[in-house]
Image (spheres, grey):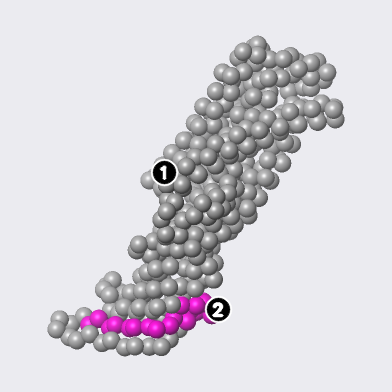
Amino acid sequence: MRTVRRFLLLHVLSAVGLVTLAFLALLFFIDMLNDLSNLGKPGFSLSGTLLHVALSMPSRAYEVLPIAILVGGVFALASLSASSEFTILRVSGLSPRTALGLLLQLAAVLVITLFLLGEWLAPAAAQLSTRLQTAAGSGLGTQLSSGVWLRNDSDRNGNQTVNIKAINTQGDLTEVHIYVLNAQAQITAELHAASGRYEGDGAWLLHDVTRTELPLQIGAALQVNQLPSYRWQTSLSPSVLGVLLLPPDKMSALDLWRYIQHLRANHQAAERYEIQLWKKLFYPFSAVVMLLLALPFAYLHTRSKGISGKVLAGIVLGIAFILLNTLFSSLGLLGTWPPAITAALPMLLFGGLGLIVFAWQVRFR
């Protein structure tokens, strides 16, 4: 049985690896073509473009690996079935339950791989890429035309709406605007700081501050004060601001959890990020779902000419899974479904489909 396990798992794993490399090569080529259109603009160079695209590959691998597992698994198992090798394995004692158990062992390895990609390698590479572009002044990352807009309810002076123009590679702030609101959501003061640095314990030291008091009475004069520094108390730590360099789908689960806590502390809607957090937690288990969908193809008795059709069916299933996953995320936001159920339903549906088809193939075919 050890020989059977090694043969089957290596056959599937090699096919998954080849499909993954093919997908990544295609995506690298497409991304390079898209980024080459920026050459000649300030801050863009060929070496910087190559580095940016290379650093995006871990995120790309995280995105395409479930489909690669499905397509590679379908191709490997269908080719074994077409060449009658899988039939020989069955005659040698490979029962359906044993085959399922062997693929679940491989799925466990792939789950760990997806988890490491999503929680460590992909977010770290994406943050590094964004900060390198920001340092180069390429106009990407946090260097947006309107900056980053946030809410802060942690200051003793009242609720605040905060605009940060940029965050540099050291985590320092540039061009900070703080709008202080009263209980009636009226702006009572505006602070502008040229820069800011984190001091710890939820405090930022802002430099070159201009504070403008806005009177609520008609005809009253503005009060403008120049301050060399200002201690700003907030729940916005560098770790929270750091996750804003990335879109939600590229954040790690820990970063998403930190940002959700910040949104809750400031009485803001966090459903979108909660759904993304649960999707991030469940996503590695899509490897199990993909192999469950691939296993029934080993029990189809067709000649080798049918392999291309099976691979096409695998691609269609993978695309359907991604579309359903995206659809349920939108439906969860619209229908205020529980985030955990919203994230888990597509995997439960496709996993159940794979098991049902597998049981039907074994019992009736």
Task: Please state which amino acid type lies under the numbered disc 2.
Answer: Gly
In this view, which residue lies farthest toward the front? 40
Viewer-nearest residue: 328 or 33: 33
User: As rendered, which of 134 and 83 lies closer to the eye?
Assistant: 134
Compared across the picture, whether 312 is left or right of 294 comes to left
**Residue 191, percent across and down?**
34, 79
Location of residue 5 (image quadrant): top right
Can you identify the residue that label 2 sits on? 200
The chief SS type of the magenta part is strand
Q: Amino acid at mark 1?
A: Ser
Q: Is residue 332 left or right of residue 145?
A: right
Q: Position of residue 205 (x, y in %)?
A: 47, 82
Would residue 358 be found to the left or right of residue 318 on screen? right
Q: Quadrant of the N terminus?
A: top right
Q: Secondary structure at mark 2?
A: strand
**Range covered by the magenta-colored residues:** 196-215
Residue at coordinates 42% horizontally, 47% vertically from top-left? 37
